[in-house]
Image (cartoon, helix red, strand yellow):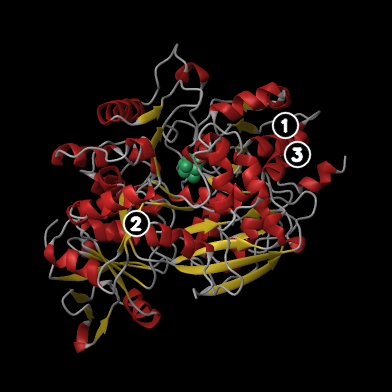
Amino acid sequence: MEPIQSITSRTVVLPRTDIDTDQIIPARFLRTTSREGLGKQLFADWRYLADGSPNPDFELNRPEAQGCKVLVGGRNFGCGSSREHAPWALLDHGILAVISSEFADIFRSNALKNGLVPVIVDDATLQWLLANPGVEVTIDLATSTLRLPGGKSVTFPIEPFARFCLMQGVDQLGYLLLKDAEITAYEKQRA
Amino acid sequence: MSAARTLFQKVWERHEVVPQTADTPAVLFIDLHLIHEVTTPQAFTVLRERGLKVRRPDLTIGTMDHSTPTRTEQVFGGKPISIASAANQVRQLELNCTEFGVELMNLQSDKRGIVHVIGPELGATQPGKTIVCGDSHTSTHGAFGALAFGIGTTEVGHVLATQCLLQTRAKTLAINVTGRLRPGVTAKDLVLAIIGRIGVGGGTGHVIEFRGEGIRALNMDERMTVCNMSIEAGARAGMVAPDAVTFEYLKGRPRAPQGAAWDAAVADWNTLVSDPGAVFDREVTLDASTVEPMITWGTHPGMVAAVTGSVPATSTDPVFERALTYMGFTAGQKLAGSPVNVVFIGSCTNSRLTDLRAAAGVLKGHRIAAGVQMLVVPGSQQIKKLAEAEGLDRIFIDAGAEWRESGCSMCLGMNGDTVEKGQYSLSTSNRNFEGRQGVGARTLLASPLTAAASAVRGVITDPRELLQD
Ligand code: SF4
């Protein structure tokens, strides 16, 4: 995982609540044994028309959305299935952070393990971002701050360990493997 | 003097290899890791790339369920699995389990089934265990007083390699269910009513403990239905404290403790209750005797009403209009009497023997309405065998339904069993998201009783109308 210090980008906005992982990537695309190349299937049922051509009305397909690295979504983003294919598809499409007022637990955990930054903001900030698509924002991990246009900024909650892992590019499996002695002791005591 | 603790706290504390600190999550030991073909290939790839082994194959059980076919000829030979990518996934799981020494219930195994059905059925799911699987409905196993939750594929790799997970302790939510369900009202209706009440994000960040008379009165199949859908309220897990009903279910199952070990286990399991005075972060109370048969009308499980009720006339849900358009419903529309094209009885929510018996009880002596397609898919090969021994398969087939091999089937559109665009599917599964059962499919979630009654009439039907016959 690449270390991340900050992300600056215009936003692309999906003004919907409860965006579930079946929308982020539908189940029929999960018959893969790889994690690569899922970006094409991101939001497939919203993004493409029945004939496979891009749906011009879908927010991610609009010209101004091209190159945006920050997605803003309504409350309870990523609910439903635990499929890690959801953050894989977002990252493969070029999304590096998602802003919402609430994330589903498993999605958030999966996102953090892949270097996709979940940014939790208060409802008023979310409403402002939903109403102002395309503004430039900066997510600064060192200060856990989301900087908005006009010099405004809000801090967002993130566990110290998760932030450390993102900023150092630390892979959590490596960290767990270092606990081998403790795990062995636990196994012995329980046996 | 130790403070009063919740069931969740007790199970959590037993599994802390390294406790949580202000700066680091806990290292939590996992007692049972269930794996399936869809969320594991990339995890095994990581193990291979890093030269790692599966630390505890003895605590790992594999099955195949999500992408597997349910047509007998594709399961037991004669015809290959019709979807090449699904066949590849199945083969990859076989290769991975062989290479890493993990037990696998393969496609033809008589112990195969939906991952959340076979764990309990084998007796591998037990009170006080930590249980994980790369699947959000792992919450099902909490019905036994286990701490069971879904994880992503990266975490599947963590558990394979270390038998541990990095976790921060969740908050607790007590759902106190007073009173008892009335005839014709099921555990599915109860959990749909709970989700309708607290919302699809109402449990986020929490582990739910379902408590009270209304829960104690449920059998294990019913408790599993309730815990299964905890995730639909956003909860990390759902739990029910074990009791005599739990022990009765587990006794004599192949992987349950036997002999003296059984008595010791029961003595220990009896301590797995929330102490009197234990404090939950939140509490909600609901009276089971007021619950009606429920059905969803929208595109998430919180969009739910009584079968005898209507689509709301207005809603504060920002996706209300969008959901109505997708479902082809109008605000205020009555639900009973609305047409149904497909009926699906199955999934880890409602595919157990008592679910099949309930549906068969309604269907017996009836034919399903002309033009309705009905699929009945048992949760495991064991359940299929038991149902056939009771003649339930004949009742389904005589009524005009299809009787299939076990698997996730129409719960999610990835194994060939799908609902066509625009069709109304009355389903006993757990998710009514857009496209969940197939592109453009319109899912109505309800109980096996409501599903069977609606199949007979061809329209959404209150099952109590047929139960009175
Ligand atoms: S039956 Fe449905 S919800 Fe259950 S494990 Fe299978 S796909 Fe998931």
Query: Dividing the image into 4 quarters, which one contains the C terminus of chain B?
Result: top right
On whether disc 2 and disc 3 are found on a single subunit, the reply is yes
What is the number of callouts on the image? 3
Q: Amino acid at mark 3?
A: Arg
* Residue B34, x across and y down, in percent: 40, 40
Tell whether label 2 touches label 1 (CB within 8 Å).
Answer: no
Q: Quadrant of residue B191?
A: bottom right
Q: Is residue B444 left or right of residue B367?
A: left
Label 2 beta carbon within 8 A of ligand 1: no
Can you tell which mark lies on residue B457? 3
x and y percentages locating residue A62 in the rendered image:
26, 60
User: Which residue type carries mark 2?
Assistant: Leu
Q: Under tag 1, what secondary structure?
A: loop
- Residue placed at 48% from the left, 57% from the top? B237
Density class for disc 1 (Cα within 10 Å; few <14, some 14-19, many ≥20) is: many
Q: Badge 1 is on which residue?
A: B368
Contact? badges 1 and 3 (CB < 8 Å): no
Give the label, 1 or 2, closer to the camera: 2
Residue drawn at x 20%, y 88% as measured from the top left: A150
**Nearest to N terminus: mark 2 or mark 3:** 2
> Among all residues in the image, which is located at the extreme bottom?
A151
Q: Is disc 3 on the same chain as disc 1?
A: yes
Q: Amino acid at mark 1?
A: Ile
Task: Measure the C-alpha gap from mark 1 to mark 2.
Answer: 50 Å
Q: Is residue A29 left or right of residue B197?
A: left
CA distance separating discs 2 and 3: 50 Å
